[in-house]
Amino acid sequence: MKTKILTLALLLGLSSSLYAVDSYKKCAACHGANGEKVALGKSKIIKDMTKEDFVAAMKGYQDGTYGGPMKGVMAGQVKGLTEADIQAMADFLIK
């Protein structure tokens, strides 16, 4: 029984990681595969942010309260992301 529970937990963990990778694919072109780039010479490096700051930034892009010069570009990029998408990306990118 313990083996089945551990296997299920492992599969759920892997599936959420794969989901985060899938959600992040469109971001990687500018931000790098692991959030290591300064996008278009203007952004913060995602992997150096705290999870809380990353989540706040994504929500801010969605509601128009965050963004500076990249606000318009990023608003379209984050428009369809759910809170779960954002949290999964934060967990994937920020250690």
Image (spheres, grey):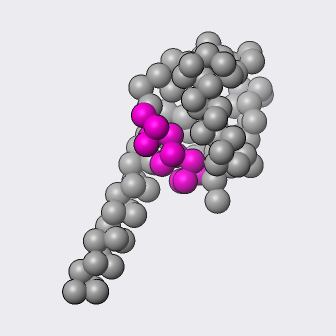
Query: Would residue 8 appear left or right of 41 to someone viewing this image?
Result: left
Is residue 36 at least partly visible in the picture? Answer: no
Q: Which residues are magenta?
A: 82-93
Residue 85 image position (x, y, % from top left): 44, 40
Query: Would residue 49 appear left or right of 90 to someone viewing this image?
Result: right
Residue 35 image position (x, y, % from top left): 64, 45
Residue closest to the eye, 33 or 16 = 16
Q: Which residue corresponds to the image point at 57% horizontal and 29% vertical from the top-left?
A: 59
Q: Which residue corresponds to the image point at 47% horizontal and 22% vertical from the top-left?
A: 79
| Rendering quarter of residue 69 | top right
Residue 45 image position (x, y, % from top left): 73, 41
What quarter of the picture does the N terminus occupy? bottom left
Is residue 87 at least partly visible in the picture? Answer: yes
Q: Main secondary structure of the magenta part?
A: helix
Q: Which residue corresponds to the image point at 32% horizontal and 67% vertical from the top-left?
A: 11
Q: Which residue corresponds to the image point at 34% horizontal and 71% vertical from the top-left?
A: 9
Query: Would residue 60 appear left or right of 40 to someone viewing this image?
Result: left
- Residue 85 part of the magenta-drawn span: yes
User: Residue 5, relative to residue 82: is it above or below?
Assistant: below
